[in-house]
Image: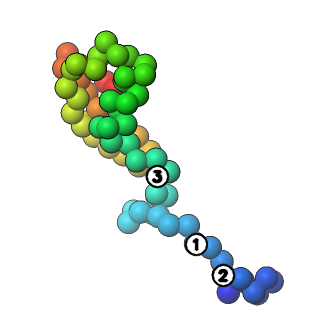
């Protein structure tokens, strides 16, 4: 309890390694949605997940393009 206000002190949630949880879930659906808006010419190419970190995700298309 917070003694000055009597309310609960909010605790930020974090991952198992102590980093904050992300605000946005980045998945292949989001990547295709962004591509359709920004680069419709690349929509026909397959996408696969390369790696993910705390605040970033890398997807790759054939021929080496990172998206």
Instruction: Give the SS element for disc 2.
Output: loop
x%, y% of residue 43?
Answer: 28, 20
Residue 65 position (above or below residue 50): above
* Res 52 visible: yes
As measured in the structure, the alpha-carbon distance from the residue carrying label 3 to the one carrying label 1 is 15 Å
How many residues crowd mark 1 within 10 Å: few (<14), some (14–19), many (20+)?
A: few
Distance (Cα) linking label 2 and label 3: 23 Å
* Quadrant in which the N terminus appears: bottom right
Number of residues whose C-alpha sits closer than 10 Å to that of mark 3, classed few (under 14), some (14–19) or many (20 or more)? few
The residue at which mark 1 appears reads as 11
Tag 2 residue: 8
Dot 3: what SS? loop
Is 23 positioned to the left or the right of 3 in the image?
left
Q: Say if 56 sits above or below 7 in the image.
A: above
- Density class for disc 2 (Cα within 10 Å; few <14, some 14-19, many ≥20) is few
Image x and y of residue 53, in percent: 36, 46
- Labels 2 and 1 touching (C-beta < 8 A): no
**Which quadrant of the view contains residue 9?**
bottom right
Q: Residue at x 38, y 42 (%)?
A: 26
Q: Secondary structure at mark 1?
A: loop
Question: Looking at the picture, how far across and down is residue 4, in whole percent?
Answer: 80, 83
Sequence order check: which comes first, mark 2 or mark 3? 2
Which residue corresponds to mark 3? 22
Relative vertical location of residue 58 with respect to residue 62 in this rendering, above or below: below
Q: Quadrant of the C terminus?
A: top left
Report if the CB atoms under discs 3 and 1 are less than 8 Å apart. Answer: no
């Amino acid at each position: 309890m917070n003694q000055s206000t009597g309310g609960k002190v909010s605790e930020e949630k974090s991952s198992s390694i102590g980093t904050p949880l992300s605000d946005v879930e980045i998945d292949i659906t989001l990547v295709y949605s962004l591509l359709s808006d920004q680069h419709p010419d690349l929509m026909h190419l397959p996408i696969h997940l390369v790696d993910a970190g705390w605040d970033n995700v890398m997807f790759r298309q054939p021929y080496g393009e990172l998206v």
